[in-house]
Image: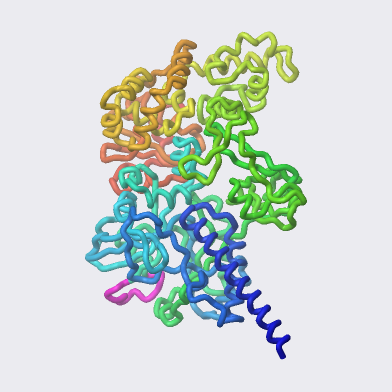
Amino acid sequence: MPTPSKKKTNNTDKIDSEMRSLEKEIRDHQYFYYLENSPRITDKEFDKIFQKLKKLEEKYPDLASPNSPTKLVGSDLSETSDFAKFKHKIPVLSLENTYNTKELVDWIQKTAPEDIYSIEWKIDGASIVLYYEDGILKNAVTRGSGGTGDDVTENIKTIQSIPHRLEEKVNLYVRGEVFMNFSDFEEFNEDFGGKYANPRNLTAGSIKHKYASEVAKRPLCIFTYDAFFPDGRGKIITNKLSLEYIKKLGLPVAPDTSFTTLDKIEKTIEKLRKKKDSMPFPIDGLVIKMDDLKKRDALGETAHSPRWARAFKFDALFQESTIEEIIPQIGRTGKVTPRARIKPVQLAGTTVTYATLHNQDYINQLGVGIGARVSISKRGEIIPAVEEVLEPGLHGVFQLPTKCPFCSTKLEKVDESVDLFCTNKKCPERERHSLLFFCQKKQMDIDGLGEKQINLFYSKGWVKNIADLYELKKYEDEMETMEGFGKKSVAIILKGIEESKKKDLRLLLPALGLNEVGHKVTEVLIEAGYENIDAILELANSKNAEEELNAIHGIGPRTTVAIIEQFQDKEVLGLIKRLKKLGLNFQANASEKSDHTPFDGQSWCVTGSFEKFQPRDRAMDIITRHGGRKVSSISSKTTHLLYGEGAGSKLEKAKDLGIELVTEEEFLKILQRESIPL
């Protein structure tokens, strides 16, 4: 008898140990997702771990922990005391995920196959709950633990599309998702040297920012989707009626919500799947909900999720490959990004030979090493990434070097970042990437100077920094004799360099790649009257620099510090002095004026992307040439907004202020009517 008992005990201990290990793994990933905003695994991989623990708890209920993560919602509660804690008045739960239509159809057939279901976009942002009392916004609270969240009311009030007062004096609790449109994110991120990984990370960080004045400068948006009526729903008996009501009250709701039955649900999902890549905001799936609110009440919820809704995740495209090499890349800011060179595979219509590994923490989490057989996906069908190790390599888990491979400087973590940085400004790889940044299309757009040419000139020692580009002519004869060059191609490069001298402060200053001094900040400084580099330098070196910069609308404390520090830096000042001597234009040019001024007295802002105007500043140049004024942000003084595909928060704010909205097609008709050539 002792032997079986011992075996049973050993088996129980093994299962208990496995369950505790799974709990820890789930909590770690919830921390990375909710607090670090940096998930280490895909949603699908997380769900595999989560479901494994759930099945073990169902099979061995005596071993289940009362504080198991399967019974709790992942928490985004701040560990600091920056925000007051707020006890939610409604259950703020997560959703169970499904990854194919068969799973979804099975769930509907088990739940209520005869009912109507809503299908909504699942926005990839940050969850928020808005609490209105007598129609006035009293609290805006993060999801937190599901029971308690962080009160971020002042930050959320800066989002232009959120009404502080509803159209009716009603008590109402509304769930929503704060997000950032792709175009807004790219424009904002460019001013910060591309430091933010994606719109979700920036959104999540923004709503927890210490200063509401800084949040106000970030192009945040929101869609609301679930309403709760503490005083009773009355005649609002369906989700459809609920969405119509909150929209009538002035709350923004997502487009394309459909209401359908089981027999049409697969067709509806397929239609939305095809459309998702053209949407201007980040989407990570769909939400399918029972439409009948009374039936929802009857079904109720578990401690983790409602029984009347499911998330349908668009599964990432995957392909298997082998890691042949892991290369640490150093960008112009010094950030280290490990990149895996893989055996080429076809994925989403392209040949993939490289995939990102993000950072050392990510490598450790997956257990990635050279020779490993891995699963590769295209995240958002754009960036190839290593998602899972299928077979480990023979050389163990890869470790990034402790020193920069290009200059031997010790790699460090900066400002509590999970990423490593090379802090040497003279690092050859940082210098090379700074040159590439300066010449690229969004910056100085120098004809004939691509990565191949920059790399060659850098390796020869002809060009080590931006100013060296403007002395490249002295190597003209040698360039013409090099393979792949010739008189014609060399002439194009030298002409492109010479032509770039005519470009003004609006393009030149952002192209220098200074921290937080991108196109937006440059435009703000120009609009504030600092129309040349001497005026900006005088401002940055004045006694009242901090006070004067903070007083400029559109410049916050962090940008102020960056401007002052950089425009007092000897290296930056030396570069500017040399570029001025070489003939570059550090003056904001006054736009060439026409005698025909149909836009006189008008202030135009632009947002989104366009077919005819690339870059979109071409449209603004036409407006200013013909009497109008260009502004970088929407205010009560703005008269017109020209908007294109992917227009974001500027469009919402313009609508709220009653500003005249003009599409690209309408703008072209105006130009045609006024006989203004493109």
Q: Pick the quarter of the image with the N terminus.
A: bottom right
Q: Residue 375 in the image: x percent, y percent? A: 69, 54
177 relative to 3, above or below: above
414 relative to 451, above or below: below
Q: Quadrant of residue 367?
A: bottom right
Residue 136 in view here: yes
Whether 556 is among the magenta residues is no
Q: Residue 151 in the image: x percent, y percent? A: 32, 58
Whether 234 is among the magenta residues is yes
95 relative to 346, above or below: below
| Front-lying residue, 376 or 230 | 376
Residue range highlighted in magenta: 229-241
Display colour scheme: rainbow
State the residue lying farthest toward the front. 2
The residue located at (61%, 69%) in the rendering is 101
The residue located at (43%, 52%) in the rendering is 204
Residue 622 in view here: no
- Main SS of the magenta part reads loop
Q: Is residue 110 left or right of residue 243?
A: right
Q: Quadrant of residue 424?
A: top right
548 relative to 229, above or below: above
Q: Is residue 431 left or right of residue 34?
A: right
| Front-lying residue, 678 or 517 | 517
Q: Residue 34 in the image: x percent, y percent? A: 47, 58
State the residue lying farthest toward the bottom. 1
Q: Is residue 220 left or right of residue 320?
A: left
So how many labels did they put on this image? 0
Q: Residue 85 in the image: x percent, y percent? A: 33, 61
